[in-house]
Amino acid sequence: FCTPCLQECLKAKKPVCGVCRSTLSPGSRALDLEKQIETTETTCNGCHKKMFLSKMRSHAASCSKYQNYIMEGVKAVTKEPLHSTRSFPNRFTFPCPYCSEKNFDQEGLVEHCKALHSMDAKQVVCPICASMPWGDPNYRSANFMEHLQRRHRFSYDTFVVGDYDADEDDMMAQVLMRSLRDK
């Protein structure tokens, strides 16, 4: 869940689960789920080492064979780039849309705007969104500060495995095919 949705579930006098709407008890943990994660064994799709689900995330982060496995899937669904990489804007540093100060990374831009421009109501183009292949370099956000808070709490590069040209439908088909094959 994103933070705003989770906060909505917890905001009521009787907090509810965002999935099943059952009442939540503050501070209670899903012990049955924790136990299941601790005791369910799985196999790494890269190196085929057996381990418990609770260890898989840290293993996957350091297993080069697993990283290769993921990249094979990405390559299988990546379209040929429509443009040369020179035609894409820089996706790593951004100018402030208010004062034009340059070379902010995404987190730095968010912090800069919160510190110096939180009260500025001028409609501006989000330089982060404009740098994305799907971004509109002419779209002016009605409330840029709200946009930053909701859309740019994390970096897209954290979740996109380095390729903005991957076709989502092909990627989903590849994931389904691989999940059946890997069983």
Image (tube, grey):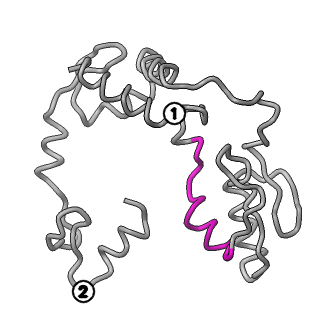
As drawn, is 11 to the left or to the right of 143? Answer: left
* Amino acid type, mark 1: Asp
Q: Say which residue label 1 marks.
A: 167
Residue at 68% over, 54% down: 129
Q: Which stretch appears magenta?
A: 142-157
Q: Nearer the viewer, residue 146 or 53?
A: 146
Pointer 2 local density, CA inside 10 Å: few below 14, some 14–19, many at least 20: few
Report how many numbered discs are placed on residues in the image. 2
Q: Which label belongs to residue 13?
A: 2
* Amino acid type, mark 2: Lys
Check if residue 144 falls in the magenta segment.
Answer: yes
Residue at 59% over, 41% down: 157
The C terminus sits in image quarter: top left
Q: Which label belongs to residue 94?
A: none
Q: Position of residue 32 (x, y in %)?
A: 10, 50
Residue at 83% over, 56% down: 95
Mark 1 or mark 2: whose residue is earlier in sequence: 2
As drawn, is 6 to the left or to the right of 29? Answer: right
